[in-house]
Amino acid sequence: MDGTLLDDKGAVPETFWSLVDEMDRRGIVFAPASGRQYATLARMFEAHDSVRTFIADNGTKVIQDGEAVSLTPIERDTAVRVIDDVRRATHRDLGLVVGGAERAYVERKDDRFVNEAARYNIDLEIVDDLKDVDDHFLKMATFDFDGVEGIVDDVFPGDWDGAQVVVSATHWIDVMSNRANKGTAVVDLQKHLDVTPAQTVVFGDFLNDLEMIQQAELSFAMENAHQGILDAARYIAPSNSEHGVVTVLKHMLNL
């Protein structure tokens, strides 16, 4: 989404809507893949019935036609460790968003942080204690107002058996099950739809897209992508500001 499909103003290009309808008519499934929660993605595409498949919360949740294709929760003990680590890091300006199977949760209540969390999580509940939340925890997303450089060694050091710590954006770092990423989500969706990597096209721009890039024979890094994605992808698409996803798909569909 950000840095890939969305333009520099954070909007879906207007030229995309007729394209996604055409793909649906041809039996091609379009699935936005994002660190955003499912409710946020569904709201963004709610005016278009042709978008019915979503890879949400960095691949921990795959939904088609309102039903879960796959869910990959984090161990509860690991989630508690993340909560404790963030609480202890009072020398950094941090806020934690717990992405649950039902909705997202925060315990930091100031508007400055809640507004950041709500940008990606429209179904957001403010609670007194994240440890008391009764839900499956899919993704523990920490926002650092000063940027996440050095945050792994500083806030999340040591071994994370069964989990992974992933930088997902300039200010966001996620802790998820080590079985969860956008790549495994694509594999789950491929199995569900009975399609192969040769029938799959992916676009990405940041490091949390790396595993997804590896699951498609037609893999595109945006021109504005992180160097690691540029190195991993088979092809390069024009930048998101140039509506590169639309340009490539129109070419592939002979439109």
Image (spheres, grey):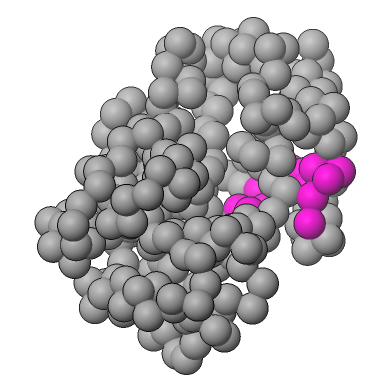
Q: Is residue 80 magenta?
A: no
Q: Quadrant of the N terminus?
A: top right
Q: Does residue 230 appear in this view?
A: yes
Q: Quadrant of residue 189?
A: top left
The residue furthest bottom is 158
What residue is rendered at 55% in x and 28% in y? 30
What residue is rendered at 57% in x and 59% in y? 145
What residue is rendered at 51% in x and 65% in y? 93
Residue 144, position in %: x, y?
54, 62
Residue 146, position in %: x, y?
62, 63
User: With 195 as the anchor, is 9 left or right in this view?
Assistant: right
User: With 32 as the anchor, is 49 left or right in this view?
Assistant: left
In magenta, the rendered stretch is 209-226
Residue 249, position in %: x, y?
75, 25
Q: Quadrant of residue 88?
A: bottom left
User: Taking 161 as reference, is 60 above or below it?
Assistant: above
User: With 234 as the anchor, is 179 left or right in this view?
Assistant: left
Along the line of sight, the residue nearer the viewer: 65 or 128 = 128
User: Taking 246 as reference, is 190 above or below it?
Assistant: below
User: Taking 255 as reference, is 77 above or below it?
Assistant: below
User: Taking 116 as reference, is 122 above or below it?
Assistant: above
Along the line of sight, the residue nearer the viewer: 12 or 180 = 12
